[in-house]
Amino acid sequence: FYIVDLIGLEVRDIEGQKIGIVKNVLDHKASAILEISFFENKVPSGLNKVESIAFTNDFFPEVEVEKGYISLNYFKISS
């Protein structure tokens, strides 16, 4: 997939619950940053409604472009 294919994907937590949407991708040559907009009642503790998160395997262990979602392990962010 291309990195821009991530824009618009549903964001799910590691349990499969829908928690937000990938709003934008910032490509910084060495790494990409995903801008995530969390649903109002699904903002993980310690995070803001909109967060910029490095696109790494630790934070995003599952990417299913064809199925329309990406998984976010937000426990790794807050640790």
Image (spheres, helix red, strand yellow):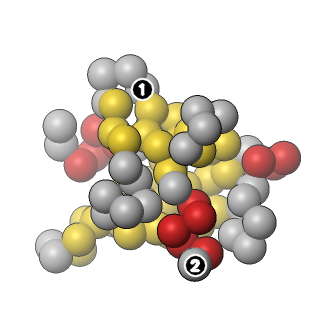
| Left or right, residue 78 beside residue 9 | right
Across and down, in percent, residue 65 comes to: 32, 30
Residue 7 occupies which quadrant of the picture?
Answer: top left
Please name the residue shown 43% across and 61% down the image. Answer: 59
Q: CA distance from mark 1 to mark 2?
A: 27 Å
Element type where label 2 sits in the image: loop
| Left or right, residue 1 beside residue 53 | left
User: What residue type is disc 2 on?
Assistant: Ser
Residue 76, placed above or below residue 41: below
Element type where label 1 sits in the image: loop
Please name the residue shown 36% across and 42% down the image. Answer: 62
**As rendered, which of 25 and 59 lies closer to the eye?**
59
Q: In this rendering, which labeled residue sits more in front, label 1 or label 2?
A: 2
Residue 74 occupies which quadrant of the picture?
Answer: bottom right
Q: Which residue is mark 2?
A: 79
Please name the residue shown 59% across and 44% down the image. Answer: 13
